[in-house]
């Protein structure tokens, strides 16, 4: 009978330790995800400000309509749109 009690105690302690260890890891990963979401939100705001600044600089749309520079302008715009979609899905 003592062997069963000792075995159950060891199993209980092992399960408790494993649960605490997994809880710590889970909290660490949750914090990482929250930090990443905050980073994405901040980057989205910066990118929107960048796009607005580029539009103010190019009020006559000389660069936006130009083939070479316009393609870069649209790549920046598409990147910002992808950030917005990712932020809305997160």
Image (cartoon, rainbow, N blue to C red):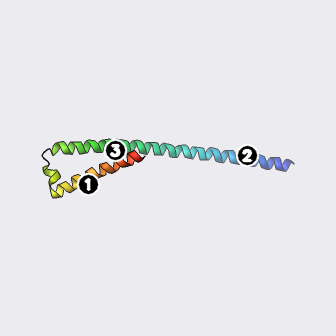
Marks 3 and 2, the one that precedes in the sequence: 2
Residue 88: quarter of image: top left
- Which residue is identified by label 2? 12
Mark 3 and mark 2: span between their CA atoms?
A: 46 Å
Left or right: 22, with 37 as reference point: right
Q: How would you rate the neighbour count of disc 1 (Cα within 10 Å): few for under 14, some for 14-19, many for 20 or more?
A: few
Residue drawn at (32%, 41%) of the image? 45
Q: How would you rate the neighbour count of disc 2 (Cα within 10 Å): few for under 14, some for 14-19, many for 20 or more?
A: few
- Which element carries disc 2, helix, strand or loop? helix
Check the image and report above or below for 53 versus 79. above
Of badges 3 and 1, the one in the foreground is 1
Residue drawn at (31%, 49%) of the image? 81
- Which residue is identified by label 1? 75
- Which residue is identified by label 3? 43
Mark 3 and mark 1: span between their CA atoms?
A: 16 Å
Q: x%, y% of residue 22?
A: 60, 47
Marks 3 and 1, the one that precedes in the sequence: 3
């Amino acid at each position: 009978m003592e062997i069963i009690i000792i075995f159950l105690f060891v199993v209980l302690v092992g399960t408790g330790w494993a649960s605490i260890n997994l809880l710590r890891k889970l909290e660490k990963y949750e914090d990482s995800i929250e930090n990443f979401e905050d980073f994405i939100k901040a980057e989205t705001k910066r990118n929107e400000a960048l796009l607005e600044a580029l539009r103010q600089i190019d009020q006559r749309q000389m660069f936006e309509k130009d083939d070479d520079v316009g393609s870069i302008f649209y790549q920046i715009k598409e990147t910002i749109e992808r950030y917005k979609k990712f932020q809305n899905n997160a």
